[in-house]
Image (tube, rainbow, N blue to C red):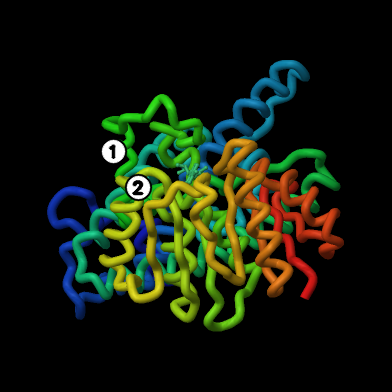
Amino acid sequence: MNLSEQTLLDLLEKKHLLFDTPHFYTLKEGDPRYLDPSEMAHLYVSSALLVTIMEFVSEQLWLSNEEDKKSGVNTLYEDFITPFFLDELAPVLFLKSFFVSGGAENIRVILKDTIAIEKEVLSLIAARPGDDLKEFVVQSLKEMTAHFIHEEKAQESREQSLGHKGLRLYRTFDNLDILFNLNYTLDREMVVDQSAKERLYQRAGAGVQSGYSTILLALHGIDPKEGSSMIDLGSGYGRVGLVWTLLRPDIFFTGYEYVPHRVTVSNAASKVFGLNNYLQFKVQDLSLESFKIPDGDVYYLYDPFTKETYQSVLKQIVEVSRRRKITVVTKGNARSRLMEISEKNSWREPEIIDYGNLCIFESQS
Ligand SMILES: C[S@@+](CC[C@H](N)C(=O)[O-])C[C@H]1O[C@@H](n2cnc3c(N)ncnc32)[C@H](O)[C@@H]1O
Protein backbone atom coordinates (compact mmCIF):
# COMPACT_ATOMS: atom_id res chain seq x y z
CA MET A 1 0.00 0.00 0.00
CA ASN A 2 1.45 3.39 -0.93
CA LEU A 3 1.23 6.58 1.13
CA SER A 4 -1.94 7.94 -0.48
CA GLU A 5 -3.72 4.59 -0.15
CA GLN A 6 -2.65 4.40 3.49
CA THR A 7 -3.97 7.93 3.96
CA LEU A 8 -7.34 6.99 2.48
CA LEU A 9 -7.56 3.96 4.75
CA ASP A 10 -6.55 6.06 7.77
CA LEU A 11 -9.20 8.63 6.92
CA LEU A 12 -11.86 5.96 6.57
CA GLU A 13 -10.79 4.28 9.79
CA LYS A 14 -10.76 7.72 11.42
CA LYS A 15 -7.33 7.04 12.84
CA HIS A 16 -4.87 9.89 13.24
CA LEU A 17 -5.98 11.85 10.22
CA LEU A 18 -9.23 13.37 11.32
CA PHE A 19 -11.16 16.05 9.51
CA ASP A 20 -10.95 18.30 12.54
CA THR A 21 -7.72 19.74 13.96
CA PRO A 22 -5.06 19.01 13.03
CA HIS A 23 -6.16 18.77 9.40
CA PHE A 24 -4.04 16.35 7.44
CA TYR A 25 -3.81 19.05 4.85
CA THR A 26 -2.02 21.44 7.14
CA LEU A 27 0.94 19.05 7.02
CA LYS A 28 4.05 20.62 5.53
CA GLU A 29 6.61 19.20 3.13
CA GLY A 30 9.05 17.12 5.17
CA ASP A 31 6.34 15.58 7.37
CA PRO A 32 6.22 11.83 6.61
CA ARG A 33 2.48 12.10 6.12
CA TYR A 34 2.74 15.00 3.62
CA LEU A 35 1.34 14.11 0.20
CA ASP A 36 2.88 15.67 -2.91
CA PRO A 37 0.59 16.68 -5.82
CA SER A 38 0.83 13.33 -7.57
CA GLU A 39 0.10 11.43 -4.34
CA MET A 40 -2.82 13.78 -3.76
CA ALA A 41 -4.01 12.95 -7.29
CA HIS A 42 -3.95 9.25 -6.44
CA LEU A 43 -5.89 9.97 -3.24
CA TYR A 44 -8.43 12.04 -5.18
CA VAL A 45 -8.89 9.47 -7.96
CA SER A 46 -9.21 6.62 -5.42
CA SER A 47 -11.74 8.50 -3.30
CA ALA A 48 -13.85 9.66 -6.29
CA LEU A 49 -13.81 6.08 -7.58
CA LEU A 50 -14.78 4.81 -4.15
CA VAL A 51 -17.87 7.05 -4.13
CA THR A 52 -19.08 5.42 -7.37
CA ILE A 53 -18.06 1.99 -6.11
CA MET A 54 -20.00 2.43 -2.85
CA GLU A 55 -23.12 3.54 -4.71
CA PHE A 56 -22.77 0.45 -6.87
CA VAL A 57 -22.19 -1.85 -3.88
CA SER A 58 -25.25 -0.43 -2.07
CA GLU A 59 -27.42 -1.20 -5.10
CA GLN A 60 -25.98 -4.69 -5.43
CA LEU A 61 -26.50 -5.36 -1.72
CA TRP A 62 -30.12 -4.31 -2.02
CA LEU A 63 -30.57 -6.67 -5.01
CA SER A 64 -28.83 -9.49 -3.13
CA ASN A 65 -31.12 -8.98 -0.10
CA GLU A 66 -34.18 -9.08 -2.36
CA GLU A 67 -32.91 -12.32 -3.94
CA ASP A 68 -32.33 -13.76 -0.46
CA LYS A 69 -35.87 -12.87 0.58
CA LYS A 70 -37.30 -14.65 -2.46
CA SER A 71 -35.12 -17.74 -2.14
CA GLY A 72 -35.05 -17.92 1.68
CA VAL A 73 -31.23 -18.04 1.62
CA ASN A 74 -29.08 -15.84 3.87
CA THR A 75 -25.96 -14.76 1.94
CA LEU A 76 -23.09 -13.91 4.26
CA TYR A 77 -21.75 -10.37 3.74
CA GLU A 78 -18.22 -11.68 3.13
CA ASP A 79 -19.51 -14.02 0.41
CA PHE A 80 -21.45 -11.14 -1.13
CA ILE A 81 -18.58 -8.62 -1.18
CA THR A 82 -15.54 -10.79 -1.96
CA PRO A 83 -16.34 -11.56 -5.64
CA PHE A 84 -16.57 -7.85 -6.44
CA PHE A 85 -12.86 -7.46 -5.65
CA LEU A 86 -12.11 -9.48 -8.77
CA ASP A 87 -13.78 -6.87 -10.96
CA GLU A 88 -15.59 -3.65 -9.97
CA LEU A 89 -13.77 -3.25 -6.64
CA ALA A 90 -10.32 -4.18 -7.99
CA PRO A 91 -9.10 -0.53 -7.97
CA VAL A 92 -9.59 -0.47 -4.18
CA LEU A 93 -8.23 -3.90 -3.41
CA PHE A 94 -6.14 -2.29 -0.65
CA LEU A 95 -9.41 -1.67 1.24
CA LYS A 96 -10.55 -5.30 1.11
CA SER A 97 -10.06 -6.25 4.77
CA PHE A 98 -11.49 -2.89 5.88
CA PHE A 99 -14.60 -3.61 3.80
CA VAL A 100 -15.01 -7.21 4.89
CA SER A 101 -14.51 -6.52 8.60
CA GLY A 102 -16.86 -3.49 8.52
CA GLY A 103 -19.87 -5.56 7.50
CA ALA A 104 -22.87 -4.53 5.42
CA GLU A 105 -23.95 -1.89 7.92
CA ASN A 106 -20.75 0.05 7.21
CA ILE A 107 -21.50 0.63 3.51
CA ARG A 108 -23.59 3.80 4.01
CA VAL A 109 -20.97 5.19 6.42
CA ILE A 110 -18.14 4.55 3.96
CA LEU A 111 -20.11 6.24 1.20
CA LYS A 112 -20.78 9.31 3.34
CA ASP A 113 -17.17 9.52 4.54
CA THR A 114 -15.75 9.08 1.05
CA ILE A 115 -17.90 11.90 -0.35
CA ALA A 116 -16.47 14.14 2.39
CA ILE A 117 -12.88 12.97 1.78
CA GLU A 118 -13.13 13.64 -1.97
CA LYS A 119 -14.34 17.19 -1.30
CA GLU A 120 -11.60 17.77 1.32
CA VAL A 121 -8.90 16.65 -1.09
CA LEU A 122 -10.17 19.04 -3.76
CA SER A 123 -10.34 21.99 -1.37
CA LEU A 124 -6.85 21.23 -0.12
CA ILE A 125 -5.32 21.11 -3.57
CA ALA A 126 -7.22 24.24 -4.64
CA ALA A 127 -5.44 26.06 -1.81
CA ARG A 128 -1.96 24.93 -2.90
CA PRO A 129 0.22 26.96 -5.31
CA GLY A 130 -0.69 26.98 -9.04
CA ASP A 131 2.11 24.60 -10.09
CA ASP A 132 0.91 22.01 -7.58
CA LEU A 133 -2.65 22.41 -8.83
CA LYS A 134 -1.63 21.85 -12.44
CA GLU A 135 0.52 18.82 -11.58
CA PHE A 136 -2.35 17.42 -9.53
CA VAL A 137 -4.88 17.81 -12.36
CA VAL A 138 -2.55 16.40 -15.03
CA GLN A 139 -1.70 13.40 -12.86
CA SER A 140 -5.37 12.84 -12.01
CA LEU A 141 -6.31 12.94 -15.71
CA LYS A 142 -3.62 10.36 -16.50
CA GLU A 143 -4.86 8.02 -13.78
CA MET A 144 -8.45 8.55 -14.86
CA THR A 145 -7.54 7.66 -18.45
CA ALA A 146 -6.17 4.31 -17.29
CA HIS A 147 -9.40 3.61 -15.36
CA PHE A 148 -11.60 4.56 -18.31
CA ILE A 149 -9.65 2.36 -20.71
CA HIS A 150 -9.93 -0.50 -18.24
CA GLU A 151 -13.65 0.14 -17.74
CA GLU A 152 -14.29 0.26 -21.49
CA LYS A 153 -12.69 -3.19 -21.91
CA ALA A 154 -14.37 -4.60 -18.80
CA GLN A 155 -17.81 -3.45 -20.02
CA GLU A 156 -17.48 -5.50 -23.19
CA SER A 157 -16.50 -8.69 -21.40
CA ARG A 158 -19.09 -8.18 -18.60
CA GLU A 159 -21.89 -7.76 -21.10
CA GLN A 160 -20.82 -10.89 -22.91
CA SER A 161 -20.46 -13.03 -19.80
CA LEU A 162 -22.95 -11.51 -17.33
CA GLY A 163 -25.37 -9.56 -19.55
CA HIS A 164 -24.98 -6.35 -17.49
CA LYS A 165 -22.72 -3.32 -17.54
CA GLY A 166 -21.52 -3.16 -13.92
CA LEU A 167 -19.73 -0.05 -12.73
CA ARG A 168 -20.10 3.16 -14.81
CA LEU A 169 -17.53 5.92 -14.37
CA TYR A 170 -19.08 8.50 -16.70
CA ARG A 171 -19.90 11.05 -13.98
CA THR A 172 -17.40 9.87 -11.34
CA PHE A 173 -14.95 12.75 -11.70
CA ASP A 174 -17.36 15.65 -12.32
CA ASN A 175 -16.15 17.39 -9.15
CA LEU A 176 -12.90 18.13 -10.96
CA ASP A 177 -14.89 21.03 -12.44
CA ILE A 178 -14.42 22.78 -9.10
CA LEU A 179 -10.71 23.18 -9.84
CA PHE A 180 -11.45 24.66 -13.26
CA ASN A 181 -13.97 26.95 -11.60
CA LEU A 182 -16.66 26.00 -14.10
CA ASN A 183 -19.49 27.93 -12.56
CA TYR A 184 -22.61 26.55 -14.21
CA THR A 185 -24.88 28.67 -12.03
CA LEU A 186 -24.09 31.62 -14.33
CA ASP A 187 -26.60 30.07 -16.72
CA ARG A 188 -29.35 31.07 -14.29
CA GLU A 189 -28.98 34.73 -15.21
CA MET A 190 -28.85 33.94 -18.92
CA VAL A 191 -31.33 35.85 -21.05
CA VAL A 192 -32.14 33.85 -24.16
CA ASP A 193 -33.12 35.79 -27.21
CA GLN A 194 -36.48 34.23 -28.11
CA SER A 195 -35.85 34.77 -31.80
CA ALA A 196 -32.62 32.72 -31.60
CA LYS A 197 -33.36 29.18 -32.69
CA GLU A 198 -30.10 27.63 -31.52
CA ARG A 199 -29.89 24.82 -28.92
CA LEU A 200 -28.21 26.57 -26.02
CA TYR A 201 -28.90 24.07 -23.20
CA GLN A 202 -29.70 26.82 -20.73
CA ARG A 203 -29.22 25.70 -17.09
CA ALA A 204 -28.33 22.13 -18.04
CA GLY A 205 -24.92 22.50 -16.32
CA ALA A 206 -22.50 19.59 -16.09
CA GLY A 207 -25.07 17.27 -17.69
CA VAL A 208 -24.41 18.74 -21.13
CA GLN A 209 -20.64 18.97 -20.88
CA SER A 210 -18.88 15.87 -22.20
CA GLY A 211 -18.08 13.50 -19.36
CA TYR A 212 -14.41 13.17 -18.45
CA SER A 213 -14.52 9.58 -19.68
CA THR A 214 -15.62 10.67 -23.16
CA ILE A 215 -13.03 13.44 -23.32
CA LEU A 216 -10.15 11.21 -22.22
CA LEU A 217 -11.14 8.18 -24.28
CA ALA A 218 -11.47 10.45 -27.31
CA LEU A 219 -7.97 11.87 -26.81
CA HIS A 220 -6.61 8.37 -26.32
CA GLY A 221 -8.38 7.21 -29.51
CA ILE A 222 -7.23 10.12 -31.66
CA ASP A 223 -3.68 10.29 -30.36
CA PRO A 224 -3.14 13.58 -32.29
CA LYS A 225 0.11 14.40 -34.01
CA GLU A 226 2.28 17.06 -32.44
CA GLY A 227 1.10 20.55 -33.43
CA SER A 228 -2.42 19.39 -34.40
CA SER A 229 -5.14 22.00 -34.45
CA MET A 230 -8.32 20.94 -32.71
CA ILE A 231 -11.68 22.72 -32.83
CA ASP A 232 -14.67 22.27 -30.53
CA LEU A 233 -17.82 23.40 -32.35
CA GLY A 234 -20.08 24.55 -29.52
CA SER A 235 -17.55 24.37 -26.69
CA GLY A 236 -19.87 25.01 -23.72
CA TYR A 237 -17.83 25.63 -20.57
CA GLY A 238 -14.66 24.37 -22.27
CA ARG A 239 -14.00 21.04 -20.57
CA VAL A 240 -12.77 19.34 -23.76
CA GLY A 241 -10.15 21.96 -24.57
CA LEU A 242 -8.97 22.28 -20.98
CA VAL A 243 -8.44 18.55 -20.57
CA TRP A 244 -6.86 17.95 -23.97
CA THR A 245 -4.36 20.80 -23.73
CA LEU A 246 -3.40 19.95 -20.15
CA LEU A 247 -2.41 16.50 -21.33
CA ARG A 248 -1.13 17.62 -24.72
CA PRO A 249 0.45 21.08 -24.51
CA ASP A 250 1.83 20.51 -28.01
CA ILE A 251 -1.58 20.93 -29.69
CA PHE A 252 -3.56 24.07 -30.55
CA PHE A 253 -7.17 24.19 -29.50
CA THR A 254 -9.98 26.61 -30.31
CA GLY A 255 -13.49 26.38 -28.91
CA TYR A 256 -16.37 28.31 -30.49
CA GLU A 257 -19.38 28.95 -28.32
CA TYR A 258 -22.56 30.98 -28.74
CA VAL A 259 -23.04 31.89 -25.06
CA PRO A 260 -20.58 34.64 -23.97
CA HIS A 261 -20.37 33.88 -20.23
CA ARG A 262 -19.39 30.27 -20.94
CA VAL A 263 -16.52 31.56 -23.07
CA THR A 264 -15.45 33.93 -20.28
CA VAL A 265 -15.37 31.04 -17.77
CA SER A 266 -13.43 28.77 -20.18
CA ASN A 267 -10.85 31.44 -20.97
CA ALA A 268 -10.39 32.21 -17.27
CA ALA A 269 -9.63 28.53 -16.58
CA SER A 270 -7.27 28.42 -19.56
CA LYS A 271 -5.37 31.37 -18.08
CA VAL A 272 -5.24 29.98 -14.51
CA PHE A 273 -3.64 26.80 -15.84
CA GLY A 274 -1.26 28.74 -18.10
CA LEU A 275 -2.72 27.24 -21.26
CA ASN A 276 -3.77 30.42 -23.01
CA ASN A 277 -0.96 30.41 -25.59
CA TYR A 278 -2.48 27.37 -27.24
CA LEU A 279 -6.03 27.15 -25.87
CA GLN A 280 -8.57 29.80 -26.78
CA PHE A 281 -12.31 30.07 -26.62
CA LYS A 282 -14.22 32.51 -28.80
CA VAL A 283 -17.77 33.79 -28.80
CA GLN A 284 -19.22 32.80 -32.14
CA ASP A 285 -22.61 31.93 -33.54
CA LEU A 286 -21.73 29.06 -35.86
CA SER A 287 -25.10 29.26 -37.60
CA LEU A 288 -23.95 32.40 -39.38
CA GLU A 289 -23.01 31.45 -42.91
CA SER A 290 -20.75 34.50 -43.02
CA PHE A 291 -18.45 32.76 -40.52
CA LYS A 292 -15.84 30.55 -42.10
CA ILE A 293 -14.85 27.61 -39.93
CA PRO A 294 -11.05 27.44 -39.94
CA ASP A 295 -9.19 24.45 -41.31
CA GLY A 296 -8.25 22.07 -38.52
CA ASP A 297 -7.04 18.53 -37.96
CA VAL A 298 -9.71 17.50 -35.45
CA TYR A 299 -13.30 18.73 -34.98
CA TYR A 300 -15.34 17.86 -31.89
CA LEU A 301 -19.15 17.91 -31.86
CA TYR A 302 -21.37 17.12 -28.92
CA ASP A 303 -24.96 17.62 -30.05
CA PRO A 304 -24.63 21.35 -30.50
CA PHE A 305 -26.92 22.33 -33.34
CA THR A 306 -30.34 22.59 -34.87
CA LYS A 307 -30.88 20.77 -38.16
CA GLU A 308 -30.24 23.92 -40.23
CA THR A 309 -27.03 24.82 -38.40
CA TYR A 310 -25.76 21.25 -38.72
CA GLN A 311 -26.30 21.43 -42.46
CA SER A 312 -24.30 24.61 -42.95
CA VAL A 313 -21.52 23.64 -40.49
CA LEU A 314 -21.11 20.13 -41.87
CA LYS A 315 -21.05 21.45 -45.44
CA GLN A 316 -17.98 23.45 -44.45
CA ILE A 317 -16.39 20.49 -42.68
CA VAL A 318 -16.78 18.37 -45.82
CA GLU A 319 -15.12 21.14 -47.82
CA VAL A 320 -12.18 21.10 -45.38
CA SER A 321 -11.95 17.31 -45.74
CA ARG A 322 -11.47 17.75 -49.49
CA ARG A 323 -8.36 19.84 -48.81
CA ARG A 324 -6.83 17.80 -45.97
CA LYS A 325 -7.32 14.69 -43.88
CA ILE A 326 -9.49 15.43 -40.88
CA THR A 327 -10.79 13.64 -37.80
CA VAL A 328 -14.28 14.33 -36.51
CA VAL A 329 -15.20 13.25 -33.01
CA THR A 330 -18.87 12.97 -32.15
CA LYS A 331 -20.52 12.53 -28.81
CA GLY A 332 -24.20 11.60 -28.61
CA ASN A 333 -26.58 11.98 -31.52
CA ALA A 334 -24.14 13.99 -33.64
CA ARG A 335 -22.96 10.50 -34.67
CA SER A 336 -25.87 9.95 -37.07
CA ARG A 337 -25.14 13.22 -38.92
CA LEU A 338 -21.53 12.21 -39.41
CA MET A 339 -22.44 8.67 -40.35
CA GLU A 340 -24.31 10.02 -43.40
CA ILE A 341 -21.33 12.16 -44.41
CA SER A 342 -18.89 9.37 -43.81
CA GLU A 343 -20.84 6.96 -46.01
CA LYS A 344 -21.48 9.51 -48.76
CA ASN A 345 -17.80 10.44 -48.94
CA SER A 346 -16.48 6.89 -48.55
CA TRP A 347 -14.59 7.66 -45.34
CA ARG A 348 -13.27 4.65 -43.48
CA GLU A 349 -15.44 2.95 -40.81
CA PRO A 350 -15.51 5.08 -37.65
CA GLU A 351 -14.09 3.89 -34.37
CA ILE A 352 -17.07 3.26 -32.10
CA ILE A 353 -16.54 3.63 -28.35
CA ASP A 354 -18.93 3.41 -25.40
CA TYR A 355 -21.72 1.86 -27.49
CA GLY A 356 -21.52 4.66 -30.06
CA ASN A 357 -21.86 7.46 -27.54
CA LEU A 358 -18.38 8.40 -28.72
CA CYS A 359 -17.32 7.97 -32.37
CA ILE A 360 -14.14 8.90 -34.15
CA PHE A 361 -14.49 9.52 -37.89
CA GLU A 362 -11.59 10.00 -40.27
CA SER A 363 -11.77 11.39 -43.77
CA GLN A 364 -9.76 9.87 -46.58
CA SER A 365 -6.25 11.22 -46.81
C1 LIG B 1 -24.00 19.86 -25.55
S1 LIG B 1 -23.00 21.28 -25.36
C2 LIG B 1 -21.39 20.61 -25.57
C3 LIG B 1 -20.29 21.40 -24.90
C4 LIG B 1 -18.87 20.90 -25.14
N1 LIG B 1 -18.55 20.74 -26.54
C5 LIG B 1 -18.62 19.58 -24.44
O1 LIG B 1 -18.65 18.55 -25.14
O2 LIG B 1 -18.42 19.55 -23.22
C6 LIG B 1 -23.28 22.13 -26.90
C7 LIG B 1 -22.89 23.62 -26.88
O3 LIG B 1 -23.07 24.13 -28.22
C8 LIG B 1 -23.46 25.49 -28.11
N2 LIG B 1 -24.10 25.94 -29.35
C9 LIG B 1 -25.34 25.66 -29.79
N3 LIG B 1 -25.59 26.30 -30.96
C10 LIG B 1 -24.49 27.02 -31.25
C11 LIG B 1 -24.13 27.90 -32.32
N4 LIG B 1 -24.96 28.16 -33.30
N5 LIG B 1 -22.90 28.44 -32.32
C12 LIG B 1 -22.02 28.18 -31.32
N6 LIG B 1 -22.31 27.36 -30.28
C13 LIG B 1 -23.52 26.78 -30.25
C14 LIG B 1 -24.41 25.49 -26.92
O4 LIG B 1 -24.55 26.77 -26.37
C15 LIG B 1 -23.74 24.48 -25.96
O5 LIG B 1 -22.91 25.15 -25.04
Q: Residue furthest bottom?
A: 226
The residue carrying pointer 2 sits among few (fewer than 14), some (14 to 19) or many (20 or more) residues within 10 Å by Cα, namely many
Q: Is residue 349 left or right of residue 126?
A: right
Image coordinates of residue 225 in percent, x first then y, are 60, 80
Q: Which residue is mark 1?
A: 186
The one nearer the camera, 63 or 348, is 348
Q: Residue furthest front?
A: 290
The one nearer the camera, 229 or 150, is 229
Image coordinates of residue 65 in percent, x first then y, are 64, 24
Type of residue at label 1? Leu
Quadrant in which residue 168 is drawn: top right
* Structural distance between the alpha carbons of marks 2 and 1: 8 Å
User: If you read the primary sequence from the N terminus, does the residue marked by circle 2 or circle 1 appear first?
Assistant: 1
Mark 2 CB lies closer than 8 A to ligand 1 = yes
Image coordinates of residue 169 in percent, x first then y, are 57, 48
* Residue at the spot 64% in from the left edge and 34% down from the top edge: 76
Image coordinates of residue 152 in percent, x first then y, are 69, 56
Type of residue at label 2? Arg
Secondary structure, mark 2, is helix
Secondary structure, mark 1, is helix
Mark 1 CB lies closer than 8 A to ligand 1 = no
Q: Is residue 129 left or right of residue 184?
A: left
Q: Which residue is mark 2?
A: 262
* Residue at the spot 40% in from the left edge and 68% down from the top edge: 279
The residue carrying pointer 1 sits among few (fewer than 14), some (14 to 19) or many (20 or more) residues within 10 Å by Cα, namely some
Would you say residue 347 is visible in this rendering?
Answer: yes
Q: Are marks 2 and 1 in contact (CB under 8 Å)?
A: yes
Looking at the rendered image, the quarter that the C terminus falls into is bottom right
* Residue at the spot 45% in from the left edge and 47% down from the top edge: 285
Quadrant in which residue 130 is drawn: bottom left
Q: Is residue 214 above or below residue 191?
A: below
